[in-house]
Image (cartoon, grey):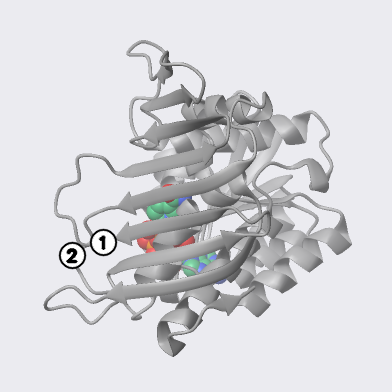
Amino acid sequence: MLRTCVIGLGRIGNLHSDIYKSDPLAQLVGVCDRNAERAERAGNRLGVPYFTSVSEMLAALKPDVCSVTTGGFEYSSDHYEPTMQALAAGCHVLGEKPISNDLRCGEEMVAFARQKNLCYAINLNHRFTPAARTAKQWQNEGRLGALLFCNMALWIGRPEDLDSPYYHLKALNPHSIDIMRYYCGDVARVQCFAIKAPGRWMWSTASINMQFASGAVGHLTSSYDLKRAHNVERCEVTGVQGRFVIEDMWMRATLFPADSMIQQVYQNPVFGGFSNFDDTFRDRIHSFLQQLADGATPEQIDGPGAEGLAAQRVIHAAIESLETGRVVEI
Ligand SMILES: NC(=O)c1ccc[n+]([C@@H]2O[C@H](COP(=O)([O-])OP(=O)(O)OC[C@H]3O[C@@H](n4cnc5c(N)ncnc54)[C@H](O)[C@@H]3O)[C@@H](O)[C@H]2O)c1
């Protein structure tokens, strides 16, 4: 049983806490928020000790695993400090995305975890679904062949302008870029166009072109501007032997073989399938716990800090392209 703590108790930290409480591999032993009211409310609700100081909680409870679910500027500036504290205390860490709004902080966290030989993972939960795994299996079986292109789209309604013109690019796109990297590998070159929807000052809809190191090409459309989206996330990956499309994140994955008119479909089942977005967190967190329980090395962890950082580098390159009008090499 892994002793777990959660640092940062907004909606997402409370969700991580609930999942640890219900996962047979974990025991939630404490929670922390520097906001005393949030800490007390969550501690009482969950029936565990609560703290307002990360260092006091780590010293008192000596957890094996910490979730860092803080937010901050661009929804990520607060991750660095508690992540470094938890790693220094010898904990494995599951951090929320984006890894950090500052690439240097991301690099330091990844390097420190490596130095301490600890597992540091990022909650890249969009790839932790049966549909995404089925598509990965098709790819591993050679059903796509050499990759040609990837079309990715993610759009949600987020009408309020937040703390930075880059908030949408930095906070939403770690998921999509991770999915693109998951199937297509490292990104070599990026070009970005974006608009600020009427009345907004934030870059709220973007069109990002990429070339992968393999030579394959990719495109991402991302938006905070759709009031009601019928299909939230769509991913299409095409190779010379076939193509798959994942629709609505976890709902359906379809394989279109190049040499046959017969398609193969994974459909989220009504009984025993995912029921809502929170199940992507449940799957991701259980996968991390299972890998730790199985004695995985830091290099074996699925969705590691290094991949969260790689996705963030693509975003920073896209922002540079947006500002300069140039294609940016990574
Ligand atoms: N994976 C996903 O699909 C997904 C979805 C939504 C949000 N998120 C991410 O989850 C994170 C949290 O989101 P939220 O909406 O719950 O944020 P939030 O701002 O509501 O909560 C963050 C909490 O962290 C606390 N905090 C910050 N620094 C702290 C520190 N050093 N010690 C103790 N407490 C500290 C704050 O007081 C705050 O209560 C963000 O990084 C966000 O990007 C991920």
Where on the picture, by quarter, is residue 300?
top right
Identify residue type, mark 2: Pro
Residue 43 pos. (x, y %): 46, 47
In this orientation, does residue 5 appear?
yes
Figure quadrant of the C terminus: bottom right
Please state which amino acid type lies under the numbered disc 1. Tyr
Front-lying residue, 269 or 149: 149
Q: Name the N-terminal-most of marks 2 and 1.
A: 2
In terms of depth relative to the viewer, which is nearer, 150 or 259?
Answer: 259
Residue 88 vs 45, above or below: the answer is below
Q: Position of residue 226 (x, y in %)?
A: 18, 56
Residue 216 sits above or below residue 194 on the image = above
Q: Residue furthest bottom?
A: 324
Cα distance in 3D space between marks 2 and 1: 7 Å
**Which SS class for mark 2?**
loop
SS type, badge 1:
loop
Q: Residues within 10 Å of mark 2 (few under 14, many from 20)?
A: few
Residue beneath disc 1: 224
Q: CB under 8 Å between callouts 2 and 1?
A: yes
Residue in the image at 52% along x and 78% along y? 327
Residue sticking out furthest to the top: 271
Q: Horizontal and vertical percent for residue 218?
A: 49, 55
Checking the image for residue 159, the label placed there is: 2
